[in-house]
Image: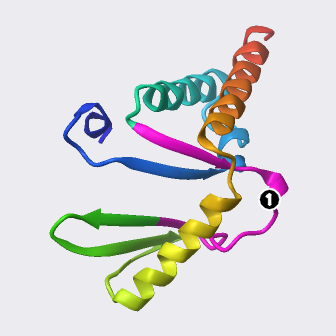
């Protein structure tokens, strides 16, 4: 899957990450620092657009789980919803429009991409700095 992001002919990836994704440690501090720096590199190479939904935004419409919108040049948009133990592909146009609105509202509450990258860099530095002290 990682190779998809290195191919200049592949689709654009625009992601809104909850701040908890940055701060909930998984795999150790060095792994977290490396993962964040990898995402930062992809964003700086214009392979992905990343926005962070900060804790200060409070509750939002996508708390139930992840939402993936897939746009195709020659087919209708699809929405894929995933939660604990379940995943659903939605193709009903009205349902998909509802999920597009959900995504738009979450993205509107998120930090702009430049501020998101600055936050990610700061968190990565915190992980790297704290890892060196032990």
Question: What x and y, as percent, mark residue 107?
Answer: 60, 59
In this rendering, would 59 be left or right of 107?
right
Which one is in front, 131 or 44? 44
The residue furthest left is 74
In magenta stretch: residue 60: yes
> How many numbered callouts?
1
- Looking at the image, is 37 positioned above or below residue 113? above
Where residue 108 sits in the image (x, y, percent)?
65, 61
Q: Residue at x 66, y 39 (%)?
A: 116
Q: Which quarter of the rendered picture does the N terminus lie within?
A: top left
Q: How is the image coloured?
A: rainbow
Q: Is residue 12 above or below residue 36?
A: below
Q: For the point 73% across and 40% down, which residue is it?
A: 23
| Secondary-structure class at tag 1 | helix
Q: Residue, x 68% and y 53% (percent of image)? A: 110
Compared to 34, does 119 lie above or below? Answer: below
**Occupied quadrant, residue 90:** bottom left
Instruction: From the image, tell me which residue sits under label 1.
Output: 57
Q: Residues within 10 Å of mark 1 (few under 14, many from 20)?
A: few
Give the side of residue 110 with respect to residue 82, left or right.
right
Residue 34 pos. (x, y %): 55, 23
Q: Nearer the viewer, residue 68 or 65?
A: 68
- Residue at figure coordinates x 56%, y 67% from the top left: 104
Q: Does residue 69 show up magenta in the picture?
A: no
Quarter of the figure that contains the C terminus: top right
Position of residue 105 relative to residue 38, above or below, is below
Magenta stretch? 48-67
Q: Is residue 53 left or right of residue 70?
A: right
Residue 81, how many percent across, how many down? 46, 73
């Amino acid at each position: 899957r990682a190779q998809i992001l290195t191919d200049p002919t592949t689709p654009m990836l625009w992601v809104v990450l909850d701040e908890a994704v940055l701060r909930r440690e998984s795999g150790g501090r060095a792994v977290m620092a490396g993962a964040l720096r990898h995402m930062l590199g992809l964003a700086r190479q214009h392979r992905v657009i990343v926005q962070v939904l900060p804790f200060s935004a409070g509750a939002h419409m996508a708390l139930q789980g992840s939402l993936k919108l897939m746009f195709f040049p020659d087919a209708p948009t699809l929405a894929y919803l995933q939660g604990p133990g379940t995943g659903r592909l939605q193709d009903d146009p009205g349902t998909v429009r509802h999920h597009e609105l959900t995504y738009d509202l979450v993205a509107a509450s998120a930090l702009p991409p430049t501020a998101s990258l600055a936050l990610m860099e700061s968190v990565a530095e915190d992980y790297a700095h704290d890892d060196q002290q032990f």
